[in-house]
Amino acid sequence: MSETIDHLNDLKEIRSLMERSSRFISLSGLSGVFAGIFALLGAGFAYILIEGLKSGRVWMSVEEIYFFLFMDAFIVLILAIGSGLFFTIRQTRKKGVRIWDSTSKRLIINMAVPLATGGFFCLALLYYGVVGLIAPGTLIFYGLALLNGSNFTLNDIRNLGYCEIILGIFATIFIGYGILFWAMGFGVLHIIYGVVMYFKYEK
């Protein structure tokens, strides 16, 4: 009986080693929380601008509006990536593993393809003035990127990807509420995901 238990423990250890070698498991839940907070702040600034334009308290040209919204999204992206790198590097050091290996490379490549495709698609929508579909487009392509990358990291990423895609589809139906859906997808969902991940794997 004892020998059987030892064999089962050995098999579990082998499986754990294989899992660590084939998946990037050093993602930090705190990076999701901070990315969500930055996204909510960015969405808040965009909402204030749009409400100001509607009420007449703010006047800006179309080019200035696009520039402000682009810079708003760009700053949110930089802050989210920066916080993600900081907490992920800290997590890898705690676990004593390398952050840059073949698995992390595959993760980045598999996420980069849908993200780059979605980025060009959304720029085309902006060029042709179809701004109502930009927020749904970012959510859907981001969700696809998460699904693509989930094969090389924690399975929880897949669930977040499904939620982003579903939210993006709803956003295509309720055109005009893009900022709200954007805030829910990149803000609220990230915070919920980050908290769950933190207490599941880091606490």
Image (cartoon, grey):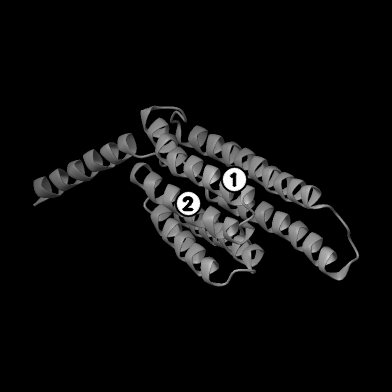
* Residue on which disc 2 sits: 141
- The outermost residue toward the bottom is 174
* Residue at the (50%, 47%) spot, across then down: 118
Q: Tell me: residue 82, above or below residue 158.
A: above
Q: Mark 2 or 1 closer to N-term?
A: 1
Which image quadrant is residue 79 in?
Answer: top right
* SS at badge 2: helix
Q: Position of residue 177 (x, y in %)?
A: 64, 69
Q: Position of residue 74 (x, y in %)?
A: 68, 43
- The outermost residue toward the right is 57
* Residue at the (18%, 43%) spot, across then down: 11
Q: Nearer the viewer, mark 2 or mark 1?
A: 1
Which amino acid type is marked by label 2? Phe
Closest to the observer: 112 or 3? 112
User: Around disc 1, counting alpha carbons within 10 Å, would you say few (fewer than 14), some (14 to 19), or many (20 or more)?
Assistant: some
Q: Position of residue 138 (x, y in %)?
A: 54, 53
User: Around disc 2, counting alpha carbons within 10 Å, would you say few (fewer than 14), some (14 to 19), or many (20 or more)?
Assistant: many
Q: Tell me: residue 26, above or below residue 139.
A: above
Q: Is residue 141 left or right of residue 60?
A: left
* Residue on which disc 1 sits: 123
Q: Are marks 2 and 1 in contact (CB under 8 Å)?
A: no
Q: Position of residue 127 (x, y in %)?
A: 63, 47
Q: Is residue 40 left or right of residue 10?
A: right
Closest to the observer: 13 or 123? 123
* Residue at the (58%, 51%) spot, across then down: 125
Estimate the spatial distance between the alpha carbons at disc 2 and disc 1, rounded to whole Å: 13 Å
* Residue at the (50%, 69%) spot, across then down: 170
Which amino acid type is marked by label 1? Leu
